Image (cartoon, grey):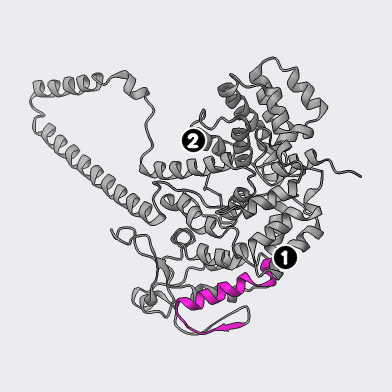
Amino acid sequence: MAIDRKMEAAVALHRFGFGPVRDQIVTIADDPRGALIADLERPGAGSVSAGNLPSSTEAARALNEFQAEQQAKRRLEDRAKKEAEAKTAAMAGDEMASMQASAAAAAEQNSQPPQQAQQPQQPQLPGQLVQNEAKLRFDTAVGADIGFVERLVWFWSNHFCISADKITSMAGAYEREAIRPHVLGRFADLLQAVESHPAMLFYLDNVESMGPNSIAGINRDRGLNENLAREILELHTLGVRSGYSQADVTSFAKVITGWTWISPAEPTHGGEFIFYKRFHEPGEQTVLGKRYPDTGMAQGRAVLADLARHPATAQHIAQKLARHFVADEPPPALVAKLERSFRDSDGDLKEVSKTLATADESWTPQRQKLKPPAEWVVGVLRLTGAQSAIPVGRVMGAQAQLGEPLWRPPAPNGYPDTEAAWIDGLGRRLDTAIEFAGRLATGIDPLALLDSGLGPLASADTRDTIARAESRTQALALLMMAPEYLRR
């Protein structure tokens, strides 16, 4: 049976990217799988030009300084308020003075130009840090040629998630610094980079974890925090029900005591990673049946290196990749191929990604995956070329309204990757589609976008529905909500 190359090209761009733009379906139709491989082989794939964006440590220090200034401002305001109250009390017997004070206050209130209250305000520093990073992320995804590598960045960022709700300053910079440089490298290097990044150490509470028998633990009467150790085993490497015990969690938590950061209040190196020996639990530790001598920070690196190469890690990662890209219940043969590729290549993520892109099981014509909100929103921006018409704050707002606020997952296991988590939100997507269409419909031909965005994937019913739409705005919203466009 002859392969429909245009159909395969359209599937490639939706399943492995963020959807087609312009004439991409025709452009890669000769070799869709080759186009995915070429995206992996691009020089600098995964990297971004950060421009003037601060590093995570610079952002942490800036936010700390901002918070200190805000605290000082509030203290001054409280001081002035108390002084004014004391003055008013002293003048309580002077009725005229009281009336004058009231009149002055009313005059000051009425003197404010009404239009000032209506002008949109720029977010303060915490919001600016996240918003600037978000714009870079959106622009990179919208401007991607194929989008496969960028989808991998998003996958790994969610796998090793942190939350801007807890560490606002570093959310975007963490993705740039810990995820992107290693997204096509070795899993062992990615794991080391993530678990030693200050954002992860703070998010999962390792910055204050102390060995019970460490110098700091004894002097401060403090102890272990097991959060990071547990999530590394359960979420980042081995997976649940993979054979580790509570004793392994406790021993591993002792191993990584001393992995912390310099307080962001320190003006030169604040926010940087540091191994603090006085926090470190002394002595040999046993994790998963293997003994690790006390070699300081190297003890933790040794455990992470072994976890990266553990058979359970290969299986866990293979299952998650297959589920993310292909189906909620992925073909067992695909999972087996990815697992074997992971083991045979010593966790080479580019080789694993090539296996994903070339395995026949990845190209099932049934498009079973419902796009999560973030992918759908970016796909709409790509299709319509509308990123300049919709401010980054509104794009972030749309994601939040659809249940997937950027860099704010509900738990350390990240956002869910199955249809059941998102299907109930399709009504809210319709509202977003109508709003976006209203902003963008001028000058856009919905039927032309149908051909470039779906091509052979579009059913006769979808084509007829869009052609019969009562307005350009309605047609564009219907395209965004077409079943073929919602799935990959």
- The stretch of residues the image draws in magenta is 290-314
Q: Could you tell me how far apart the alpha carbons at marks 2 and 1 are, in whole angstroms? A: 38 Å
Residue 277 horizontal/vertical position (percent): 39, 77
Pick the quarter of the image with the N terminus.
top right
Residue 298 magenta-drawn? yes
Amino acid type indicated by mark 1: Ser
Q: Nearer the viewer, mark 2 or mark 1?
A: 1
Residue 121 horizontal/vertical position (percent): 37, 31
Q: Judge left or right: residue 366 versus residue 416.
A: right
Residue at image x 50%, y 32%?
Answer: 394
Residue at image x 58%, y 68%?
Answer: 188
Q: Against 279, is 34 above or below? A: above
| In front of the other: 140 or 481 | 140
- Give whichever of discs 2 and 1 has the lower sequence position: 1
Residue 380 magenta-drawn? no
Q: Judge left or right: residue 91 versus residue 133.
A: left
Q: Is residue 241 visible?
A: no
Tag 2 secondary structure: helix
Mark linked to residue 251 = none
Residue at image x 68%, y 41%?
Answer: 371
Q: Against 188, is 421 above or below? A: above
Residue 481 horizontal/vertical position (percent): 69, 30
**Residue wearing tag 2:** 392
**Residue wearing tag 1:** 341
Q: Is residue 481 visible?
A: yes
- Looking at this rendering, what residue extends furthest in the right direction? 1
Amino acid type indicated by mark 2: Val
